[in-house]
Image (cartoon, rainbow, N blue to C red):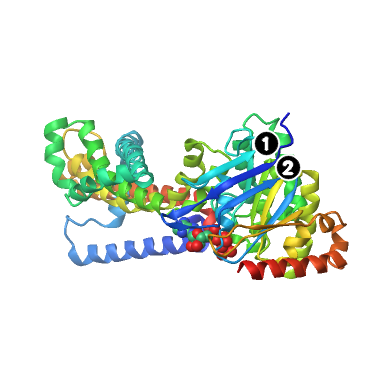
């Protein structure tokens, strides 16, 4: 999206960013209290963070998100595909998905912690759980929405199941998959924050809570801004993928 | 290799029911020699597309036998080029990629990449759509999509070519030009061809035989020999006496089968 609209879009984003800073500064002047530092102080704190420190914390958070997203995609794609292409599997798994879908996955956090401890596994697993059901459902519906006739020519020339998957099923369902990732990414990042509060000394969640406990508010806000940046970069990534693979719709 | 009796496309007692008890086409038995164009004409809903889908191997079940040179048409040796009524292009692939995918699947160990790309270019050019190579199907007009679908069907060098109303989306002039192009390409690669059309003239202009499908499903199709017209130069067909006589004859058969 950013790429397509190019410079004007980028300028607009910058303008909004600037306005938000101005509002922030005015709020700072009005409140005049250490719990809301000025933008200048926060940017300065950000500047003083060690590059290694930032890279480590951002890196850990990104890695966890990537692992969680990847797992959710692999498993979700497999199950969604089975359900989308086979009546039998759909009838078998549909009630399972139907019953488990409404469970608020964040409520499973304590359970996951009990089963998998406080380490990396439970953090990645939570992200995966949040995404998985969305991916399954969107893949299934995306696959079902591909008209059967799209496969006709490939069938008539004797294409294998694998060839049909790569040339029809996956590209046909990709747009739904991408928009699902875009939507669930926000939730995944929020959950990541919670899971990084415990059992780790790396990650943006840890960084922000650590600064909070030390009452270092400028650094806390700097962490929040960095965390937002991580989210922004991820959104941008999905946009770039969308731009690359969805050209055919424009 | 194969005896004359077995050569070509043989359809024996084909019966298709999408919902049981409701035949989708009249009982079809046809013997069509190899390397010919056979046009199929008949009222809407008479089962023209169904017949092609059966040959293309797209129906989960049917009754009867479909043989090519003595073997099942669904044998590995028989390569089927299909131009579906809805063109059947993959919207997420460019024109060039659409053709490339089909070629890769049908001959995975085909020569070099360069040869294949050159061949794709050749087919695009011969259908007059070279400049569309990088476009996506959704950005093409119906007629342009049809040409891509035809180029793709030719590019895999099929033994059987199936076309379902391939020129229906075209204006009369473009249609005539494309009929000529189609015939030229076909002569260079004369696959056994079933060509469905709504248009009596087109059926006579292109077909060696004209197959008239009945609307009543208890009836059988009527096959008219059209060799005299087929043997003429294409540009001379339309003004010939034979063409005129043949039109009258086919219209009469169609009326009887309505
Ligand atoms: N998928 C399907 N399910 C059920 N019935 C079908 C299906 N496809 C076709 N039919 C029925 O089979 C019969 C033949 O249809 P078919 O599409 O082969 O006709 P056609 O001669 O190609 O018509 P047209 O000229 O309109 O394309 C029709 O009665 C149609 O309703
Ligand atoms: Mg039809």
- Taking the spot 23% from the left edge, 62% from the top edge, the residue there is A28
The answer to whether the beta carbon of the residue marked 1 is less than 8 Å from any atom of ligand 1 is: no
Q: Is residue B186 left or right of residue A163?
A: right
Mark 2 and mark 1 in contact (Cβ < 8 Å)? yes
**Residue visible at 71% across and 70% down?**
B252
Q: Where A173 falls versus A12 (above or below)?
A: above
Report the residue marked by disc 1. B69
Q: Nearer the viewer, residue A179 or B184?
A: B184
- Left or right: A174 in relation to B137: left
Looking at the image, is mark 1 or mark 2 earlier in the sequence?
A: 2
A115, above or below B14, in the image:
above
> Can you tell which quarter of the image residue A59 is in?
top left
Q: Position of residue B46 (x, y in %)?
A: 56, 62
Where residue A181 sits in the image (x, y, percent)? Answer: 35, 49
The image quadrant of residue B227 is: bottom right
- Residue for badge 2: B34
- At numbered mark 1, what does the secondary structure look like: helix, strand or loop? loop
Query: In the image shown, does B89 or B205 lie closer to the viewer?
Result: B205
Residue B63 percent coordinates (x, y)? 50, 46
Mark yes or no: residue A243 visible. Answer: no
Residue ID at (32%, 47%): A135
Classed neighbour count for the residue bearing mark 1: other residues with Cα under 10 Å, few (<14), some (14–19), many (≥20): some
Numbered badge on residue A36: none
Residue B184, how many percent across, how many down? 81, 51
Residue depicted at x 61% and y 45%: B11
Q: Is mark 2 within 8 Å of ligand 1?
A: no
Q: Is residue A12 above or below residue A117?
A: below
- Tell how many labels: 2
């Amino acid at each position: 999206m950013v790429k397509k609209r190019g410079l004007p879009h980028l300028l607009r984003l910058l303008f909004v960013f600037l306005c938000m800073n101005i509002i922030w500064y005015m709020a700072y002047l009005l409140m005049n209290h250490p719990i809301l530092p000025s933008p200048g102080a926060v940017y300065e704190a950000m500047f003083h963070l060690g590059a290694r420190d930032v890279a480590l914390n951002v890196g850990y958070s990104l890695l966890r998100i990537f692992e969680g997203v990847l797992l959710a995609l692999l498993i979700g794609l497999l199950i969604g595909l089975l359900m989308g292409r086979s009546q039998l599997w759909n009838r078998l798994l549909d009630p399972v998905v139907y019953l488990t879908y409404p469970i608020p996955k964040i409520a499973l956090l304590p359970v996951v912690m009990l089963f998998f401890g406080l380490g990396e596994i439970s953090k990645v697993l939570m992200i995966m759980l949040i995404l998985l059901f969305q991916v399954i459902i969107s893949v299934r519906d995306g696959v079902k929405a591909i008209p059967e006739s799209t496969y006709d020519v490939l069938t008539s020339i004797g294409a294998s199941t694998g060839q049909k998957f790569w040339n029809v099923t996956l590209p046909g369902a990709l747009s739904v998959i991408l928009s699902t990732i875009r939507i669930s990414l926000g939730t995944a990042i929020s959950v990541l924050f919670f899971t990084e509060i415990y059992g780790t000394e790396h990650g943006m969640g840890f960084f922000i809570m650590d600064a909070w406990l030390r009452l270092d508010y400028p650094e806390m806000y700097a962490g929040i801004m960095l965390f937002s940046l991580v989210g922004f970069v991820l959104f941008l990534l999905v946009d770039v993928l969308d731009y690359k693979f969805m050209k055919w719709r424009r | 290799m194969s005896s004359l009796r077995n050569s070509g496309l043989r359809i024996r007692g084909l019966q298709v029911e999408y919902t049981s008890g409701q035949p989708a086409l009249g009982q079809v038995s046809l013997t069509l020699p190899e390397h010919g164009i056979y046009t199929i004409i008949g009222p809407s809903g008479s089962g023209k597309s169904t017949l092609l889908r059966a040959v293309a191997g797209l129906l989960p079940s049917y009754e009867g036998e479909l043989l090519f040179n003595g073997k099942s048409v669904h044998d590995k040796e028989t390569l089927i080029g299909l131009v579906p009524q809805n063109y059947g292009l993959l919207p997420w692939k460019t024109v060039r990629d659409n053709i490339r995918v089909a070629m890769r699947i049908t001959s995975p160990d085909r020569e070099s990449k360069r040869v294949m790309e050159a061949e794709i270019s050749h087919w695009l050019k011969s259908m007059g759509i070279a400049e569309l190579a990088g476009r996506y199907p959704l950005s093409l007009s119906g007629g342009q999509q049809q040409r891509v679908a035809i180029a793709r069907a030719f590019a895999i060098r099929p033994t059987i070519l199936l076309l379902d109303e391939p020129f229906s989306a075209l204006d009369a002039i473009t249609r005539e030009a494309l009929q000529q192009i189609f015939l030229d390409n076909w002569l260079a690669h004369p696959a056994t061809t079933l060509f469905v059309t709504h248009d009596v003239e087109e059926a006579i202009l292109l077909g060696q035989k004209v197959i008239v499908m009945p609307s009543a499903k208890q009836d059988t199709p009527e096959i008219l020999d059209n060799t005299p017209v087929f043997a003429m130069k294409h540009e001379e067909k339309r003004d010939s006496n034979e063409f005129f006589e043949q039109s009258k004859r086919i219209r009469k058969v169609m009326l009887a089968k309505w």
